[in-house]
Image (cartoon, helix red, strand yellow):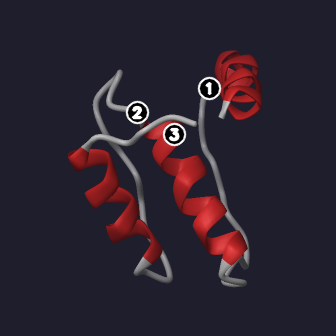
Amino acid sequence: MTKLSKLQSDAVYWLVRRKRALLADTMGGGKTIMAFAAAYYKLLTGQVGSILVITQASLLTNWSNELQKH
């Protein structure tokens, strides 16, 4: 299990408190793990409606690897 930094934890908290949100951060900021954490929280609390991820097709393998890792 990966431990989130304070900034990442604050971002996840902000994301899960909104009906709609956009997560945009600099490269290497941990957007993937923040998105996973927010989606997982929404899933556990029964709040998941739909989640849209827009990314480059070349990052699909990275997302799959990160999901398996975490």
- How many residues crowd mark 1 within 10 Å: few (<14), some (14–19), many (20+)? few
The residue depicted at 40 percent of the width and 33 percent of the height is 30
Q: Which mark is residue 56?
A: 1
Q: Where does residue 48 sit, x and y in percent of width and height?
A: 70, 76
Discs 2, 3 touching: Cβ within 8 Å: yes
Q: Quadrant of residue 47?
A: bottom right
Q: Look at discs 3 and 1 and give the one toward the viewer.
A: 3
Q: Quadrant of residue 28?
A: top left
Going by the numbered disc 3, the residue's amino acid type is Ile
Between 70 and 33, which is closer to the camera in this rendering?
Answer: 70
Between 10 and 28, which is closer to the camera in this rendering?
Answer: 10
**In the picture shown, does residue 20 fall above or below 68?**
below
Q: Look at discs 1 and 2 and give the one toward the viewer.
A: 2
Q: Which residue is mark 2?
A: 30
**In the picture shown, does residue 40 fall above or below 58?**
below
Describe residue 30's horizontal placement relative to residue 2 as left or right. Answer: left
Of pointers 3 and 1, the one earlier in the residue sequence: 3
Between 24 and 48, which is closer to the camera in this rendering?
Answer: 48
Q: Which mark is residue 33?
A: 3
Going by the numbered disc 1, the residue's amino acid type is Gln
